[in-house]
Amino acid sequence: MQRAAVFDVDGTLVDTNHLHVTTWWEAFRQAGHQVPMHAVHRAVGLASTDLIAHLLGEDRDTGQDAALSAAHKALYGQYFDRLPALPGAGDLLRRLAADGWTVVLATSAGGAELGALRRAIDADDAIAATAGADDVDAGKPAPEPVEHALELAGVPAERAVFVGDTVWDMRAGSRAGVRCVGVLCGGLPRADLEEAGAREVYADPAGLLASLDESPFA
């Protein structure tokens, strides 16, 4: 039977979370909002509109949302040519594909940003499909991104493992009924990931690859 290995990208396969923190912080600052970086960090992983709502509240001037998102996108885009893959990211995806797993990315990125992330990972030969934010009505922590990834793979939830670095990832995967694996390279504590649904937690893709035979991928 087919099996699906579903991966978040930012903070899980590519070391971008703190770039997102800095560029969102600057986008908020330019718009006159003082948002602490630690708060931005814990919101990374949400889709843009959800992140803005989470940090500014539902009573904000929603007319600013598009400009804030565009400012973040422009600031973050300055790094597209040098996004760093996390240790072992490409090797992990290639190993899983060679072992018969259908590898699908579940990400809120799209367009040029997704292209830059895939270039950083440098494992297109192992990636079967991508479920992006534009493909679903609700982003993480809703289960739709993971459920769409499973549809693309043609695999039921019980035959899948989802790897991510945020509580939003773990909640989305848990709600979709898949086994969740957390990685610490996004900067969140192990306890937070476990509380949100992670069955196992590893340091980074290289750590998961080194322990693959004892992991949920075994």
Image (tube, rainbow, N blue to C red):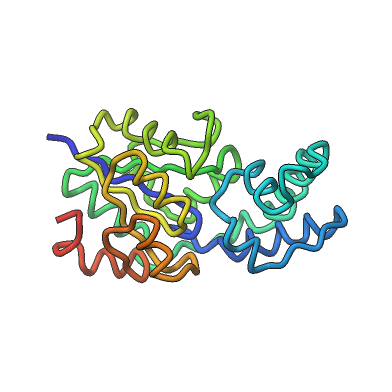
Q: Is residue 118 above or below residue 150?
A: below
Q: Is residue 155 above or below residue 26?
A: above
Q: Quadrant of residue 24?
A: bottom right
Q: Please give the name of the residue rendered at 69% of the width and 48% of the height, measured from the top-left corner.
A: 52
Q: Is residue 89 above or below residue 73?
A: below
Q: Please give the name of the residue rendered at 53% of the width and 28% of the height, measured from the top-left corner.
A: 137
On the image, the x and y values in percent for residue 36 come to 72, 67
Assign the N terminus to one quadrant of the image: top left
Q: How many marks?
A: 0
Q: Answer with left or right where residue 43 lies relative to residue 69.
A: left
Considering depth in this image, is 196 or 67 the residue closer to the camera? Answer: 196
On the image, the x and y values in percent for residue 84 come to 51, 63
Q: Is residue 205 above or below residue 114?
A: below
On the image, the x and y values in percent for residue 20 come to 63, 58
Q: Please give the name of the residue rendered at 44% of the width and 37% of the height, measured from the top-left corner.
A: 145
Q: Answer with left or right where residue 174 lies relative to residue 70.
A: left
Q: Please give the name of the residue rendered at 36% of the width and 41% of the height, measured from the top-left corner.
A: 175
On the image, the x and y values in percent for residue 217 come to 19, 54
Considering depth in this image, is 49 or 6 the residue closer to the camera? Answer: 49
